[in-house]
Image: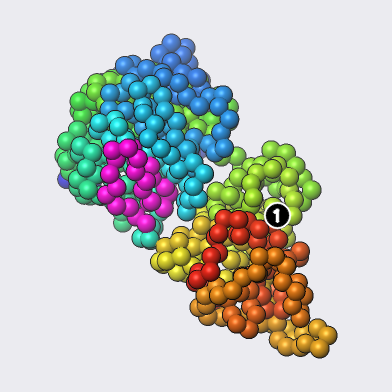
Amino acid sequence: MAPEETWPIATSVGQMLRRQARARAALSTLLVAAATCVGVAASTTTAAAAASHDDTVYAFGAASFRGSTQGIPLVRPVVAMASTASGNGYWLVADDGGVFSFGDAEFHGSLGGRPLNAPIVGMTGTSTGHGYWLVAADGGVFSFGDAHFHGSMGGIPLTAPVRSIIRGPGSGGYWLYAADGGVFTFGSARFHGSTGGMQLFAPVVGMASTRGGRGYWLVASDGGVFTFGAARFKGSMGGRPLYAPVIGMAREGSGNGYWLAGSDGGVFSFGSAQFEGSAYGLVPPGRHIGQLVGMPHGNGYRMLAVDDIPVVEQVGPGASGPAVSNLQSRLLSLGYWLPGVNAVYDDLTQQAVYAFQKWQGLPRTGTVDGPTQAAFVNAQRPRPRSASGYVVEIDKTRQVMMVTTNGIATWTFNISSGSDHPYVEGSNSGDAHTPEGVFTLIRQVDGPDHGPLGTLWRPKYFTWQGHAIHGYTSVPPYPASHGCVRVSNTAMNWLWATNTLPLGTTVWVYL
């Protein structure tokens, strides 16, 4: 079936957002539609009466509240939820792959503490309820319990990040969908079409499949609904004012209707889906609704509130506090190396900011100034040149080092390579050049290595002429070495401790 999208073509995203702002200023409650296809909460009082929640998980109708991570110290924020087959429990997952179980949800393992190439963005359970899959933004899939691995997007270039994963018919497969509406099928999940290649007015944010898996719906953040295969169009938000972007959709148990949800907790019902209440007016400041999950059978749904992504503030060396913590978290989420979040704008934070500025082509100030702050808004993880294998890339033009796996930059470091100036050090002279080419780590010294040009900290050599990746006390944002590749001593200690640069690793140096 051809996709059906009902948002007016002439309406731009900017116009939509301005319309939303005017409508929010004029109205303090949600409108209730008289038509049977749409229902929303009439007021915050109505929503409060219908919801069972704790400011993280909100349950409506036949869906019951079973607990959440509220009050549990988290290393990383929760980003997604999946229901058990019975609907009497659910799992929550953090962006580092940590999994939390509630109700009749069984814990089958997690990725907590395991290095990831990209953050976890979604999960779905098996039809038995005895397993689940996790998916990362790069399309990597991880299976636990009786969830079998059927494939992933690992190593395949994506034009847009993966949004989430949907279970296919039975437990024999799954779909992945991306922000551009691209749909990827594995196992028993069949391809019925996608919006990949279409001109979209807003990104795709949600997907739901028919009961038999012979079709699916996609929804965009403007409330436009697209239908594929056996999925029937039941309505959309086309032309209706939105008070917040749509964040997802869920299918009603019979398969004859669906709900859409906004980031403010508003719920819109279509077809046989019954309106059971909303979280509008209940979500505390600093949070928003990030996911809508329907009950496997009948009416009822749950909503997951997630933390807002704070705007990176203009801040610099010597600062401390929440603004710095946010900066460090954003740098880590983009793969720029830091030992952790300590809320202090120290030398290592500045090193990470240097690396970010270099990749973005910005002046290397080491401070989050206006241009750097603006670059964080749409920043994505650096993209290496290599497409497969485990490769350490040295980009001499940008002056960064990337540790890559199958075309994904796991970590990006600030470096300083050869200055390409002649040097004289005692009786030694030469040109401070870092050679380009493909090399291999061939020798290492676990400690200080005293050479004719100075002391190298824990060097890992990639040429027999003495070129190495090593720690150093000074790593400026420009080429300054005699020909080696400098990283901070702390970064070098981490590279050793995690065995990130074992002997035999391919090193690709290029301009």
- Image position of 155 with respect to 165: above or below: below
State the image coordinates of residue 213 (x, y, percent, origin top left).
Answer: 19, 39
Relative image position of residue 315 (x, y in whole percent) = 73, 48
Q: Amino acid at mark 1?
A: Leu
Q: Tell me if 362 is positioned left or right of 317 in this view.
A: left
Where on the picture, by quarter, is residue 350?
Answer: bottom right
Q: Note whether 455 is above or below 286 in the view shown.
A: below
Q: Quadrant of residue 465?
A: bottom right
Q: Is residue 279 toward the left or the right of residue 457 in the image?
A: left
Note whether 172 is above or below 431 in the view shown.
above
| Colour setup of the view | rainbow
Report crowding for label 1: few under 14, some 14 to 19, many 20 or more residues within 10 A (C-alpha). some
Q: Which residue position is annotated with label 1?
A: 348
Q: Is residue 273 visible?
A: no
The reply to whether the magenta stretch includes residue 57 is: no
Label total for image:
1
Give the residue at x 55% y 27%: 72
Residue at 59% across / 63% down in the picture? 359
Image spot of residue 25 (x, y percent)? 54, 27
Q: Would residue 139 be found to the left or right of residue 486 on screen?
A: left
Q: Which residues are magenta?
A: 132-154
Query: Quadrant of residue 295 in the image?
Result: top left
Question: Which corner quadrant holds the C terminus?
Answer: bottom right
Identify the residue at horizontal 55%, vertical 73% (top origin).
441
Rendered-image quadrant of the N terminus: top left
State the residue in front, 504 or 264.
504
x, y percent for residue 106: 36, 28
Q: Determine the residue located farthest toward the front in the rendered image.
A: 446
